[in-house]
Image: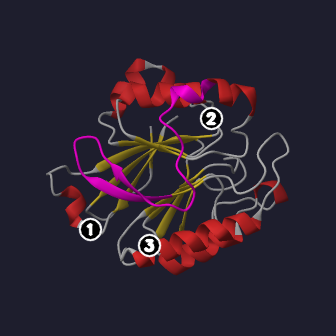
Amino acid sequence: MIRRVRVAWPDPRLFADGRDAVRILAVSDAVDPALGWGANRDALGRIDLVVGCGDLEPAALGFVIDSFAAPSILVRGNHDTGAGWSQGVHLIPGVARSGVSIRGRLAGGGELEVLPFGWSGTPGAVARRDEGAAWRDVLGARARRAIRGHAGRPFIVISHAPPLGAGDAPDPYHRGFRAYRWLLEGTRPVLWLHGHTPLASVPWRVTCGSTTLVNVTGAVLVELVTSVPSRTMEA
């Protein structure tokens, strides 16, 4: 089941080319079976950007990117390691550097600022968290945005793990990062996409102030629109 959500984007320049929405397909953690069927992919329509929030094999990511012929931005998760990843990494365009914002190119033209954060810690079967690494990524990101004069611009965050207390789970393994929570409250991104947290344990969509946070485990179609977002839809 491919979930859908609409989020209001405050800057009309994103839609200057006449499009009524920017459509992002975000995936992570588990292959959504619905994407295996051509009819389901066709029903999604135009995709302007594919986002990968970690813990998917390169072959699965490559399939999604190729199916929609769209630009992509990817971060690595805590399980994105080992022989399976190394042998298939040539199938994807590459992963984003944590804490360094990207002016993501959209299908059909236009740009969207995306701030990526891969897993902060030791990857592998027993992935140890590193809150210090998360803080280094976050502080560097905020400083770079300020230096470039981007501090007041709307942007999106993509990460593998969520912020603390905003889409995470209470168990230590799926607890969010405190550094991310600081960034969330201090910069108020319009949208935060993440994976890592099992869908059965928490709501898949939460809000914190003006930010919409979406757990994209499986697949979620996000539409950025100029109007007030409609109710969450599932299809």
Residue picked out by circle 3: 145
The tag earlier along the polypeptide, 2 or 1, is 1
Circle 2 residue = 56
Image x and y of residue 200, in percent = 70, 47
> Is any atom of residue 16 visible in this view?
yes
Tag 1 residue: 11
Instruction: Please name the residue shown 69% across and 38% down the image.
Output: 80
Coloration mode: secondary structure
* Residue range highlighted in magenta: 88-115
Foreground residue, 160 or 150?
150
> Which residue: 51% across, 39% down?
94
Q: CA distance from mark 1 to mark 3?
A: 17 Å
- The three-letter amino acid code for the residue at tag 3 is Arg
Q: CA distance from mark 2 to mark 3?
A: 29 Å
Q: Position of residue 160 (x, y in %)?
A: 63, 51
- Evaluate whether residue 208 shows in this view: no
| Residue name at image x 71 percent, y 64 percent | 133
233 w.r.t. 141: above or below: above
How many labels, in total?
3
